[in-house]
Amino acid sequence: MTQNKLSYIVLFLGMVAIANSSCKKQLQVGDPNDPTLVANVNNESGLIAFAEGGVYMNGFANGDGWLGDSYFSLPYGYMELMADNVGADASNNQITTVGFPTYYITDDGLKHPNGSPSVKIIRGYNVLGGSGNNPVYFQWQNMYALNAACNQILAIAPKITLGGDATTRLNTIMAWCYWWKGYAYSQIGTMYYSGLEQDDPSNVTNNHYLPKDSILARSSYYLNQAASILSGITNTGDYTTVLTQLIPKACQVGNGGVLTTSMWLHNINTLLARNILMNKLAPFVNGNPGASITKSSTGNMTATDWNNVLTLATNGIQKGDYVFTARSAATNTIMSATGGTVASMTTGGNISSAFKISVRFVANYKPTDKRLTQNIRYGSIYNNPFYGTPYSIKDSLQMSNTGIYVLGNKLPGQYEAFIAGSYEENALMLAEANIRLGNIDQGLSFVDAVRTYQGAGVAAVSGTGLTLAKALQELVSERRVSLVFRGLSFYDARRWGWIYDISNGGGQYGQQLYNANGTWFTNVTVNYNFMDYWDIPADETQLNPPAAGSSPILNPNY
């Protein structure tokens, strides 16, 4: 059975599991003990429930009980580990090893090598049936399950009798599927060296692996298909009626809500811009905007790329737009309040939390930043040679200030996990594109805007005469703190060049470290030497061997 076949089965298991989901009445389809399309998806309510469950259950809940309990705990967790925003000491799923550097050099000149670097760990555990310890397995599993669900919905939807303005209702469901297919392909193409184009509703086995650029092109294709449909919708009443049912009620809070067609188009443009930005290099190593990476699986951003990002982000998510988010609920939830996100698994005392907030992450805050004092507690000491830290993330119950962005909250329904884009991400893409194109002050004004939006309370940096290098440092620091736990951090570290071997121009310099003896180091060199794009999971390739002419299933640069 191939992974694509597995995804198809997960789809139906998701329908059974829907009875235990966050929106039981919305998601349950017919008789959960007889999950067949004929019996369960034969009217509008069944179709909408199927479309909701196919995304939120298959994409973000099913199969995610290995560490935490959703897509936003373990798959996002790997992103934060490899970005060095958090550390871990548990052996679960290789979280203590996947983000550990090949070596680091402390201020005293001592080199501290790691006998089992990340690439060795990833390949050693990428075996058939080893999913519990295979980091590359989870994101692939979830995104192809989500994609398979959307294929089924697209095939069924035109055959169902819909009420009201049937054309508008059908188009809304089709835009929903195209959006999520675009999202799934974006996740695959941004993480894996190769992928599969899987668009057949029967989920017939496809073993022609395509390069990541082709997968990203497929993402952009479906995002543009969604945009085309949304641009033609004029009946906002029937559109809103359907979308209100497609998005779980628990997710229609705060920044999450029922998007207008204009808001959704903004979200699409942000994701299209992300597809470009996250998959090209923009090296900024050791404070050098002109740094060069000599061995990478992707190329450098060009002026054309920066202008394309600028154009898309200008028409991207605006302040006040609704976006796609996920939240826990008190009962029947798609993710728990304490284990559903990287944030919840980092919040609390650093001795007991699964993830430990890194001193190298905390160093990105300015000392006067209200987000620092609001969210970070200095106190209990977690001892570890590399991940040692005296910092913990405060639980929201320890906070008194309002209007300041909250990093951690373990109360049901309170923490907001961003699934796709956000206002902050879009604004910081505008910032980086402008800075790289020479519009430094204009770019820095977006950095200031994000800090104001999150209640940082720090002095503005636009109009202060910063050089390109200093402006990029402000941008880099702000992306790290304002977009943490959103599934972007590793991609930033990759495109800035930090994750590459020092011999190829990568590494991080001038970093902080708090070791097991309680010694602070402030000028540490770190050679992460991580794989930039992951191999394909063995659970796919051994059961679905590549056809002749396929793109490599293993990253050939490692």
Image (spheres, helix red, strand yellow):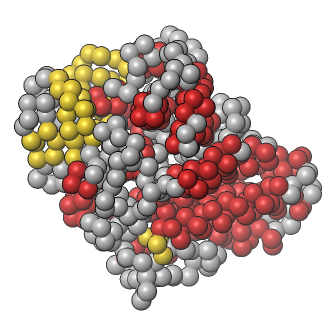
**Placement of 456 over or under 260, stated as above or below:** above
In the image, 499 versus 17, the foreground residue is 499
Q: Residue at x 55, y 39 (%)?
A: 438
Is residue 440 visible from the viewing direction of this image? yes
Residue 189 at what x, y percent from top left? 49, 63
In the image, 345 versus 331, the foreground residue is 345
Q: Which quadrant holds residue 31?
A: bottom right
Q: Which quadrant holds residue 167?
A: bottom right
Q: Most extreme residue toward the top, as rendered?
A: 400
Q: Residue at x 84, y 50 (%)?
A: 239
- Please tell me how many numbered marks the rendered image carries: 0
Q: Residue at x 56, y 74 (%)?
A: 198
Image quarter where the N terminus lies is bottom left
Is residue 360 shown left or right of residue 344?
A: left
Is residue 161 shown left or right of residue 483?
A: right
Is residue 7 visible from the viewing direction of this image? no
In the image, 114 versus 247, the foreground residue is 114
Is residue 193 shown left or right of residue 519?
A: right
Residue 345 at what x, y percent from top left? 38, 35
Image quarter where the C terminus lies is bottom left
